[in-house]
Image (spheres, helix red, strand yellow):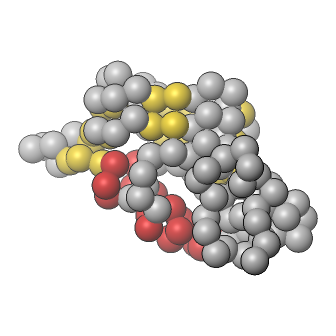
Amino acid sequence: MSKCEDSDEYENCSDGDILYELDNKCLFHSDDNNKDTSDFIQALQKKEGSDFNGYVFPVEVEYSIFHQEVIKKGSESSTITFDKEMIFKKAHFLKGIMLAGLIFEKSINMSECKFHEECDFKEKSF
């Protein structure tokens, strides 16, 4: 079986996924602009854990695209909390990131990220 080109650097590759011809990387790490966004979201929602190191997000990032394991809803339906450490080191956000109003109970690592469109972190708590 082929391995993602980034599997030596990152331990969070999508096992068993197809590799994209453009860069020989898995669904999560591929820079291919033609990768299927619905496949990406479905795989992301199934992925347990909160390590998104080096991921290339082809869709706007908001809390609902993540696996429910990392999200805790408060007593008010508008209160959304990430209660795990979130790792986005070296991630690329091709369509922006909208995490306004969220609460992060643990640390969030966004070092060396690249933001290609608008980012909104208003009214968030760390």
Residue at (46, 29) in percent of width and height: 108
Q: Count the numbered circles shown.
A: 0
Tell me where residue 14 sits by quadrant.
bottom right
Residue drawn 46% across and 62% down? 47
User: Quick one: 48 or 110, which is closer to the camera?
Assistant: 48
For residue 112, which quarter of the picture? top right
Q: Quadrant of the C terminus?
A: top left
Asked if residue 18 lies left or right of residue 72, the reply is right
Q: Position of residue 87 (x, y in %)?
A: 51, 37
User: In percent of the image, x 9 and y 44: which residue is there?
Assistant: 75
Q: Position of residue 78 (x, y in %)?
A: 22, 43
Q: Residue furthest left?
A: 75
Q: Specify the farthest residue to the right.
A: 22
Name above or below for residue 47 compared with residue 53.
below
Residue at left offset 29%, top offset 38%: 83
In this rendering, position of residue 86 left or right of residue 20: left
Please tell me whether residue 38 is drawn above or below residue 93 in the rendered image.
Answer: below
Residue 49 visible at all: yes
> Could you tell whether 78 is left or right of 121 in the image?
left
User: In the rendered image, which quarter contains the N terminus?
Assistant: bottom right
- 7 left or right of 84? right
Can I make out residue 123 in this image? no
Q: Residue 90: percent from the left, percent from the top?
A: 68, 35
Pick whichever, 84 or 11, lies toward us.
11
x and y percentages locating residue 93 in the rendered image: 66, 43
Q: Which residue is at the front of the view, 108 or 78?
A: 108
